[in-house]
Image (tube, helix red, strand yellow):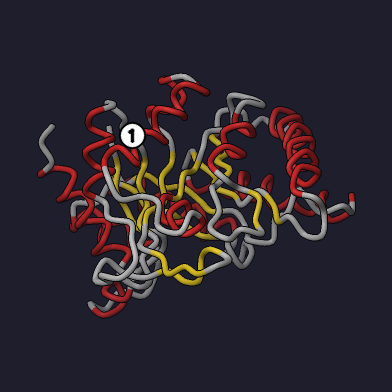
Amino acid sequence: MIKFGPSGNGENFYAVGNKHTEEAAEYCKNLGLDCFEYSFGRGILLSESKAEAIGQAFHDAGVELSVHAPYFINFANPEDEAAQKSYNYVLNSAKYLKLLGGKRIVFHPAAQGKALREDAVRLTSDRLKILRDYIYLNGYEDFYFCPETMGKLAQIGTLEEVIEFCKIDKVFIPAIDFGHINAREGGSLKTVEDYKSRLEYMISELGYERVKHFHVHFSKIMYGGKGEIKHLTFEDTQYGPEFEPLASALKELNLEPYIVSESAGTQDIDALEMKRIYGSVDI
């Protein structure tokens, strides 16, 4: 079943008097949302008991949780010590995901740095094979680890690169940020066919079953010559992408992803708008 929800708590969550993430469970449920992404972007800053309390609240509300691993991850860093920190960021995220009762971990694969792109991509792939081994050694193979498409040209994470990373093992499924793709490609996502071509490519490379419930980030994003500049809201009319053609493409291909809004401050409202749009689209 397709799911819609926010990344973290939006401005309206606090405006109506909420203060704690446990309250986001009932808040999302009452809005009619289905999922919620907890960000460890700046590091894992909550206690194990707090994670269990948040997980229980979301379990009781019937709202599914995912997590975003710390932004510091860079599997293309040439230093082995730095790579070990990246492994630990992902594995610690998995530890807390288990406490939260979720199933999905999104992570940024790498930055190109001073290396040739093909060398950085190759090193990232080699490191993800080591990560796969750590995942199995620690008993986390029932989770989905989701390398994300990235919005800046200097980041590793084109659609094609992410799909190749996911071929390493079934524990990896793609996190496709359509705002990032659109920003990276200078506004490339406009029509239903623009989306369908990407989705059909994913299916041809990974198979329908692995793609059916893939992970999605969606927001409008300002971009320039180097790609992504900043996240916007659905109120923006200058930059894309628009969600309606993606909704049509998903329905045409019978895909039911986990869709997370990363709008700037209106992520809950825009997640609900995506759910409304999806429900209104006929194919």
Q: Judge the density around disc 1: few (<14), some (14-19), many (≥20) Cα neighbours within 10 Å.
A: some
- Label total for image: 1
Q: Position of residue 44 (x, y in %)?
A: 62, 61
Note whether 214 is above or below 113 in the view shown.
above
Q: Is residue 108 left or right of residue 211?
A: right
Identity of the residue drawn at 26% across and 66% down: 234
Q: Position of residue 180 (x, y in %)?
A: 47, 55
**Which quadrant holds the N terminus?**
top left
Q: Position of residue 254 (x, y in %)?
A: 27, 26
Determine which quarter of the picture holds residue 191. top left
Q: Is residue 121 left or right of residue 34?
A: right
Amino acid type indicated by mark 1 = Lys
Note whether 199 is above or below 216 in the view shown.
above
Identity of the residue drawn at 82% across and 60% down: 114
Q: Which residue is nearer to you in this view: 206 or 56?
A: 206
Q: Position of residue 189 (x, y in %)?
A: 36, 50
Q: Is residue 104 left or right of residue 8?
A: right
The residue singled out by tag 1 in the image is 196
Q: Could you say whether the residue bearing mark 1 is in a helix, strand or loop?
A: helix
Q: Which residue is nearer to you in this view: 199 or 21?
A: 199
Identity of the residue drawn at 34% across and 40% down: 195
**Which quadrant holds the C terminus?**
top left
